[in-house]
Structures are given as C-alpha cells and as structure tokens.
Amino acid sequence: MMTIKSSYLGNLRTESTHVQSNTNLLTDAPVDNNGKGEAFSPTDLVASALGSCMVTIMGIIAARDGVSLEGLSWEVTKIMQAQPRKIEEIKIDFFWEKPSNDPALIQKLKNAARTCPVALSLDPSVKQTLNFNF
C-alpha cells in the first residue's frame, strides 16, 4: 500500500499527503536555494524526522519501564554543506524537565535515540551531534 502521495504545486513548493491519516504537509525551497522558505524544506523534514524518530523510540523504551517522558523537548539545528549541497550535520539538544534518577534508564534512552530507524538510515557522512541535557 502506498504510504505518501505527493504533487508539485509550482514555485518550488510541494504538497504531500500521508495516505493512512490524510494529513498534509507542504515543503518550500529554502531562501538560500531560490525559494521562499515559507514551509519546511525537504532537508528540514529530514532533520525533524531524526529528532522525532529518536524521541519516539525513547518513548517506547520509557513506556516499557513505566516511565513518562512528559516534559521532554528538543531543538534541532541543521547544517548544510555547500558543494555538493547536502546535509552536513544535524545537531539535536534534548531537554527533560523531570528526568529519571535511574542512570541505567538514562543510558537505555540515549542508546535508543542513537539507534532509531532514521539515525540508522542516514548516510554515515551526515554527522549526528546529540546533547542530552538531563
């Protein structure tokens, strides 16, 4: 079954629909690459997907251990390389208002983040810099 259906809207903008949920998202080319930057760029989505995937897998691990990740947030910084134009590095800073006091759980969460499907799918040349502020 198809996962995503997309179309080009013109002016360097695309629209994608997640088939199962019928949720839509737009992309725009970034300002530094001839676009308007009025929506996520495709490379922004990659960077966002990395953070979201990491936290989703961390959430699965936490739930198995009966721990809530409520109050967990993260900030993503995407760094582009000029030639060839590609993602050079994705930096993610994680913050947790009420972290667990269990060092073993904290280590499991960090390992889960580093081995999420998106992290494992990115080319090894894309540097993944993670800062766990908890």
Image: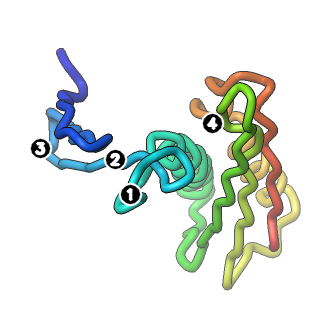
Q: Give the residue pinned by disc 4.
A: 116
Q: How crowded is mark 3: few (under 14 residues within 10 Å), some or many (20 or more)?
A: few
Residue 52 versus residue 68 in the image, above or below: above
Quick one: 6 or 1, which is closer to the camera?
Answer: 6
Q: In the image, what residue type sits under mark 4? A: Cys
Rendering coords of residue 86 (x, y %): 66, 32
Q: Give the residue pinned by disc 1.
A: 36
Quick one: 20 or 34, which is closer to the camera?
Answer: 34
Q: How far is the residue under mark 1 from the one under mark 3?
A: 25 Å
Residue under the point 77% across and 48% down: 108
Residue under the point 19% across and 18% down: 2
Rendering coords of residue 63 (x, y %): 53, 56
Q: In the image, what residue type sits under mark 2? A: Thr
Q: Give the residue pinned by disc 2.
A: 27
Task: Give the secondary structure at mark 2.
Answer: strand
- Farthest right residue in view: 103
Q: How far is the residue under mark 1 from the one under mark 4?
A: 32 Å
- Farthest front residue in view: 34
Give the quadrant of residue 98: bottom right
Task: Give the secondary structure at mark 4.
Answer: loop
Rendering coords of residue 13 (x, y %): 28, 44
Q: How crowded is mark 4: few (under 14 residues within 10 Å), some or many (20 or more)?
A: some
Q: Give the residue pinned by disc 3.
A: 22
Q: In the image, what residue type sits under mark 1? A: Lys
Q: Residues within 10 Å of mark 1 (few under 14, many from 20)?
A: some
Q: Which of marks 1 and 3 is in front?
A: 1
Q: In which quarter of the image is the C terminus?
A: bottom right
Q: In the image, what residue type sits under mark 3? A: Asn
- Tell me if residue 17 can be seen: no
